[in-house]
Every structure is written in structure tokens, then in C-alpha cells.
Image: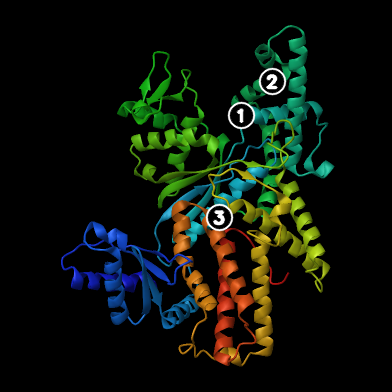
Amino acid sequence: MKAENFLTQGVTKAIEEFYPGADVPIEFQATRKDFQGDITLVVFAMLKVIKGRPEAIGDQIGAYLVSHLPEVVGYNVVKGFLNLILSDAFYLSAFEQIINEKQFGFSERSVGALLVEYSSPNTNKPLHLGHIRNNLLGYSVSEILKAAGYKVYKTQIINDRGIHICKSMWAWQQFGQGQTPGSIGLKGDKLVGNYYVKFDQVYKAQQKELMDQGLSQEQAEAEAPAIKAAQQMLRQWEQGDSEIVELWKTMNHWVYDGFEQTYTRLGVDFDKNYFESDTYLLGKKDIEHGLAKGVFFQKEDGSVWCDLTNEGLDHKLVLRSDGTSVYMTQDIGTAIQRMSDYPDAGGMIYTVGNEQDYHFKVLFLILARLGYSWAQHLFHLSYGMVDLPSGKMKSREGTVVDADDLIDQMQQTAQEITESLGKIEGLTAEEKSKLFKTIGLGALKYYILKVDPKKRILFNPEESVDFQGNTGPFIQYAYARIQSILRKAQKEHSSALTIKKWEQLSLMDKEKSLVKTLMQYPDKIQEAAGAYSPALIANYTYDLVKEFNGFYQNLTILGAEDAATLSFRVALADKVGQVIKSSCGLLGIEVPDQM
């Protein structure tokens, strides 16, 4: 039951009575905390159509609503704002509807299908902190879109070809001595990443040697034996050299296995993987069709371009003069292929860092010019980088914060802080281990997802595991507290819990405020889906927990004065717990039954 629905009808009738024929805009907003009321009608918006003092108009409409709508029991006017006070019966009825909904907040209406791309790593190094933000965003946006009524296909494109892969391959050939992940007990992505770092070390040493012999830095970079060897290896791969292709397959599979272990730890998944080695030639035919349609033009050297100057951009190369593809060519072809693979999808969200903003602006414009209607429904979920207090990460130099190492660190930090607070008496060693994982991952995910995707993050592991403030453990602890209350209620007051005669209850402000916050959940899911922003869900959950804590600290639940009040408050706590679990699920966060 949304208050705006019946209030809009009531206000419309009031306008018809007092201002016949006036087409008045009706706008509601949440009542400010320093005013008395539950919902506010913005009278100022009406002054464009009807004349008069806003206070007088507000008073007139307020009095009408009190006399005609049983749900409105009072009002006050502050300047151009009509603050309406709704009845306890309205909130009790709304709560009844909430607890009777099977999946409260989730849309039962199908609104179409979307593709969501995220992760999309290179196979020359392990996943790092930046990939963690990417994966958490992509996964959470997918879950939020599902809750909002979309069918979602989660995809990634694995960048498994190119010079960066050959660098790791060459270094392994030179220095690996036949090492495999199994032979040295190391995850495959870490093993391959070590040789990527080794290549860079050798390459830099060779550059220095050449520069000492009198070459410029640019010449040294081009003439160093290591880079020439990697470039030759890339040419051999493209020509299908069986030995090089076999090594490429072997090392890539080491990496895929490593990635999968990290994805499992993070709790993310995919419906389909695309591989750049399969897609890098896609797009050439689409460029030919675009040339024929006049979307592209060809220069004298044979290269093909798209003129985007009328869009405030520049000329964009889509095919080199020798007929080879560029990244844009591949992305055009891959987008078309994906939409062909999933014909029911109406659009796609690309989860990629903000350094690619320009690339996606160009890609979407070109696809639209090629005549694909779904191009109007492509979105670049652009996000800022993640920094640590120690500074930026550089993968070539081996200073990247490895994703697995960070997860381990988060679990260790969770263990240290939890043990120092003395919150785990009575748990077995296995239960403690599981709890530390749940708290550590929850802290990591929440800290990253509570921030608007566009903003850069300075990630502080210790701060994220704080049990106070806007953190994952703070929210998890509230859920665990609620489960403790429910267990005690079932044990000590089971007969009272069957009493559902709530219609005569007089609600306390804290109870009403908590119901009001619960009622916002469906709209918050839709808002987060529309903005592709898990931060809206994270911060809603924090607000809900704060409201619950205020309710818990000011009102007794199990010591309520009568059975009906006890039953209502237990049911209210139970539903808050369910919504915390549900909203945390949209963020990929687990909640423990006890802490």
C-alpha cells in the first residue's frame, strides 16, 4: 500500500472542488525530520497553475484530506509544504501486506532481459583489487536488476590473446624450468603473473643496457631482445604455430582455473564466457556493411574511419590500412554477436573502469549508426579506481594487491577484531572459521559497494571491519541480534506469537518509523536498478539498521506490556531481519545467524 496512491486521488478531488478545471501538478516528498508528519505535499509546485498564498492552499487541502480520507489524521503547513500525518491503522495495514508478500520488494512483473558484462580480465596475471570492485559491481547490479523484474545474462570477455600474454609465455619458456601450478603448489593465475613480472624485470634491464650503449629510451624499448621475442611469439600464434598455440592453451588454462577459484571465493558467477581469441576477428564484416551504408569512410591508404565530429568527437579508426582490426572493431562485432546469442535481450551494461569512458561513448554511437535499435539501451557502468593508503597499483612491477591475498587479509582482520570484542564464546572452531570468512568478505563487499560507482575509493581494510558505523559488520551484527531475539521469543513466548490482533494497537513513533522504512524497500530496488547503483541498496540497508537499533534501544520487545504488542514487535523485528538478509543478498553479502 503506497500512501502516494490514495493521497493523489484525494488531492485530485480536493483540487476539483476548490479549483475546478485546474490541471495541477501533484508532487510528494518525504517529510523533513524536523517537521511533524509522514509525507509532504509540495504546494509550491501548484502555484504555477493556481493563485493564492501557499499556506492558505495547503491548509485548505489538508483540512479536506482529514475530513475525507480515514488514513489522514492530521496535518500542518510550513510555508509551501503540507505535512500529512497518517493513521496507525494505515501503517498496520501496510505492514500486514509486507509480511504476506513472499519476496517483499522484488518485482513480480517481467520487464525484459539485459546482458551485464563484468570482470573481463587479462590472462597474464591474477585478479587484483581493481577487479574486485568490477566483479562486485557487476554481480550486484545483475542481482538488483533481477529483483527489479529483469531477466539477466551475466557475461565476461576474457582477454586471452595479445602481446601481454606472450610476455608471460616467453618468460616462462626462459626461466620456468617446467614449473606448473601443481608442481610448486601455486594457483595458476599467480604462477603466470609471476612470469609477467619477470618479463618486465628482464625487459627493463635490457633497456638500461642498450641506453648505456647510446640508444635513446624509445630505441631501447623497441630493440630490447625480450620485446622482440614476445612480438615474434605473437606472430607465430597468429600464424597457428602448433608449439606456441599449445603453450598458450596450457598457460591460459592454468589462469582460468585460478580465476575460477577466486570467483568462487568472491561468490560471483557468469552465464557465458567469451574469449578474445574467438572474437578478435569479429566486426570486419560489420565494417564492410557500414562502409556500404555510408556509416564509415575509407582513406587513401585503405584504412576505415567513422566521422563523429558532428557529435563533438573526432574521427575514429575502425580498420587499419592493412585490413587488421583494432579494439573498436572487435567490440562492435562482439556486441552484435552477443545480442544475436541472446535475442530476447533489449540492451547491455558494460562494467568497465572510467578510463574507458570515451571508448564506450564512441562504441555506442557507432552501433546506433549501424542501425541496431538495442544500441539505445547500452550503458557503460563507469567506475572509479580503488586505491590503498600505500598508493597506486602497478601490475608489471608486481605491486598489485592480489585479490586472494586481500580476501585472506580481510578474514584475518575480521578474526582479530571479532576476538578482541569477545563476541564468539560458545562457537566451535569450524563455526568461528566460517564466521570470520563471512564477516571479512561482508566488510570488503560493503565498503566497496556503499560508494557511488563513479567515485574513486580509498580502501582501508581495518576501517571496513569496524563494528560501528556504516560498515558490513555493523549490518551483519544487527541481523545476528535479530535472530537471537527470534530464538528467545520462540523459546519463551511461543503462545503469544500466535496472537495477531494488531488492528487496535497504538503505534509508538519508533515502530511507525521502522514500518515506514520497510515500506521504502520496493522503491529503493527500482531506483537502484534504474541508476545501476548498489550504493543505493547498501545505504538503504544502513538506514534500516539504524532505525531498527533505535527501535530496539527505546522499546522493549520481549518485555512488551501485552501479548499483541509483543507479537507485533517480534513480527516487525523478524521482517526487518528478512529485508536485511534480502538487501545484503543483492550486494552478494552473507549474514550470520550469530556473532
Q: Residue at point 74% right, 21% down? A: 204
The part of the image, by quadrant, that contains residue 299 is top left
User: What amino acid does circle 3 point to?
Assistant: Ser
- Drawn side of residue 302 relative to residue 430, left or right: left
Q: Earlier in the sequence, mark 1 or mark 2?
A: 1
Give the spatial CA distance, label 1 vs label 2: 13 Å
Among numbered discs 1 and 3, the one appearing first in the sequence: 3
- Residue at (77% x, 29% y) in the render: 198
**Residue with the mark numbered 2:** 227
Residue located at (81% from left, 28% from top): 175
How packed is label 1: few (under 14 Cα within 10 Å), some, or many (20 or more)? some
Q: What's the residue type where badge 1 is placed?
A: Gly
Q: Position of residue 171 (x, y in %)?
A: 75, 27
How many badges with numbers are in the image?
3
Residue at 81%, 74% in the rendered image: 426
Q: Which mark is residue 162?
A: 1
- Name the foreground residue: 390 vs 356: 390
- In this view of the protein, can residue 580 be seen by the observer? no
Where residue 274 appears, as percent x and y from the top left, is 55, 42
